[in-house]
């Protein structure tokens, strides 16, 4: 089983992992590729502090991208944690994140389509007509006049982003299922 090399070669998967554990955390991922190791071994190999290595491993574990086996040293009674990567799940996590983004953008599109908006020229806060009327067309933050805004450009941008995410989700479903 390929446990990560091809996944780390995928720019989208690498970007996701970098967002998750930072560039420094990728050093831990690379050090653990294709094998099992303790957090102490990884710290020694990467030259990173043990707490930093553990933070990365726990973050990966939180997303089920790594797992561990705990063994107890019979002589001193301490536990040793041996870690391994399970990066195959990264594509499911990316899909879930895109699905959440798609849902949020769709809600935003539904909320602004067919409505009239006003905005403050200083802080660019969008306010629907009903709220603007209650505020007497004054910005609640700075008191400046609210001006009519054509939301069509925003609607089009949201529609393009929604279409892009739908295409990516469709392609991902075909490629990774």
Image (cartoon, rainbow, N blue to C red):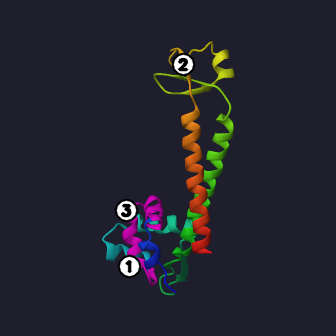
Residue 119 at x, y = what percent?
Answer: 54, 24
Say which element carries label 2: strand
**Where is residue 91 shown, x and y percent of the image?**
56, 69
Of all residues, the one furthest to the top in this rendering is 136
Which of the marked residues, 1 or 2, is nearer the chain's N terminus? 1
Q: How far apart are marks 3 and 2 (CA)?
A: 43 Å
Does the residue at mark 3 contact the one at mark 1 (Cβ under 8 Å)? Answer: no
> Of 4 and 154, which appears nearest the observer?
154
Which residue is at a point 40% across and 60% down the rendered structure image? 22
Compared with 24, 73 (above or below) is below
Query: Reading the chain from its start, which is encountered first: label 3 or label 1?
Result: 3
Q: Which SS class for mark 3?
A: helix
- For residue 147, the mark is 2
| Label 3 sits on residue | 23
In this picture, residue 13 sits left or right of residue 108:
left
Which residue is under mark 1?
41
Alpha carbon of mark 3 to alpha carbon of mark 1: how far? 19 Å
Q: Residue furthest left?
A: 47
Q: Residue 140's spot in the image, x, y percent?
A: 57, 19
Label drawn at residue 118? none
Magenta span of residues:
12-37
């Amino acid at each position: 089983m390929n446990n990560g090399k091809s996944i780390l070669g995928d720019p989208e998967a690498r970007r996701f992992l970098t967002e998750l554990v930072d560039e420094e955390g990728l050093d831990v991922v690379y050090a653990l590729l294709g094998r099992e190791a303790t957090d102490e071994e990884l710290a020694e190999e990467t030259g990173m502090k043990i707490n930093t290595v553990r933070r990365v491993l726990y973050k990966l574990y939180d997303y089920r991208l790594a797992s561990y086996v705990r063994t107890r040293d019979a002589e001193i009674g301490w536990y040793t944690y041996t870690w391994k990567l399970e990066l195959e799940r990264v594509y499911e996590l990316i899909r879930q994140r895109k699905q959440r983004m798609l849902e949020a953008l769709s809600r935003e599109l539904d909320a602004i389509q067919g409505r009239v908006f006003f905005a403050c020229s200083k802080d660019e806060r969008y306010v629907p007509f009903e709220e603007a009327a209650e505020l007497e067309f004054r910005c609640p933050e700075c008191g400046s006049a609210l001006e009519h805004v054509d939301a069509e450009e925003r609607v089009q941008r949201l529609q393009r982003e929604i279409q892009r995410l739908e295409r990516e989700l469709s392609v991902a479903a075909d490629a990774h299922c």
